[in-house]
Image: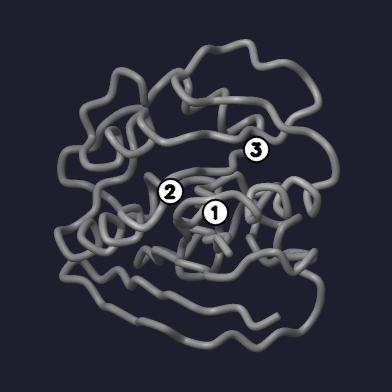
Amino acid sequence: MRKIVLYVLTSLDGAVDQPGHYFPSPAPRAGGPPAFDPVLAACEARMIATQDAVLLGRRMFDEWADYWPTSDEQPFADFINGVDKYVVTSTPLTASWGGARAVQGPVAAVVADLRAGRGQDIGVHGSIELARSLLREDLVDVLHLAVGPVVDPTGRRLFEDAGGHRHLELIEATPTPAGSVWLSYRIPH
């Protein structure tokens, strides 16, 4: 059965709204993705190599459909532009982006249908409201956190209303030269 793999960029204190601020670059790229050091970039590349589909929330889809089709940020641009994209939404998609299709219904039913299909892991990248729903309903199998060396006391947190106390199994903890940490957890069901 395919796994649901949640990937979130976060500050040290769990903020998720400004990933470009958590991974600062000497040459900031306006409107682009955050800058990763080579170790963090390698962790991300290893993770996306196991995925052949992504599940996105509507707002993330609308933002990314404007940015990624013309981006040269590798390897993520080739990955996200070439992968099947399932967008959880109650309204038709207004942007055209290769491999994107709208899915609707209870998130548990959407996930069950995707898991039942053939293929590799299904990634959930960003899409914080969708991520929270998946966590609350115990639908996430693996959680990857790219943690930037920044404290940001404002904005949303991934684990707000996450459904109560839960023990995660550490798979990997990799520090990076820029002071970030890549954390991977298995979420027992």
SS at circle 3? strand
Along the line of sight, which residue is nearer the eye, 36 or 166?
Answer: 166
Circles 2 and 3, Cβ within 8 Å, touching? The answer is no
Tell me the crowding category of disc 1: few under 14, some 14 to 19, or many 20 or more residues within 10 angstroms, Cα based: many
State the separation of the CA atoms marked 2 and 1.
6 Å
SS at circle 2? helix
The dot on residue 28 is: none
**The N terminus sits in image quarter:** bottom right
Circles 2 and 1, Cβ within 8 Å, touching? The answer is yes
Residue furthest out toward the front = 118
Q: Residue 50 in the image: x percent, y percent?
A: 36, 58
- The amino acid type found where label 1 is placed reads Val
Tell me the crowding category of disc 3: few under 14, some 14 to 19, or many 20 or more residues within 10 angstroms, Cα based: many
Q: Label 2: which residue?
A: 19
Q: Residue at x 60, y 44 (%)?
A: 127
**The C terminus sits in image quarter:** bottom right
State the separation of the CA atoms marked 2 and 3.
17 Å
Q: Residue at x 20, y 60 (%)?
A: 42
Circles 3 and 1, Cβ within 8 Å, touching? The answer is no
Q: Earlier in the sequence, mark 2 or mark 3?
A: 2
Select label 3 or label 1 by which is in front.
3
- The amino acid type found where label 2 is placed reads Pro
- The amino acid type found where label 3 is placed reads Gly
Q: Label 1: which residue?
A: 16
Q: Residue 44 in the image: x percent, y percent?
A: 31, 57
The dot on residue 57 is: 3
Horizontally, residue 59 falls left or right of residue 175, namely right
Along the line of sight, which residue is nearer the eye, 175 or 133?
Answer: 133
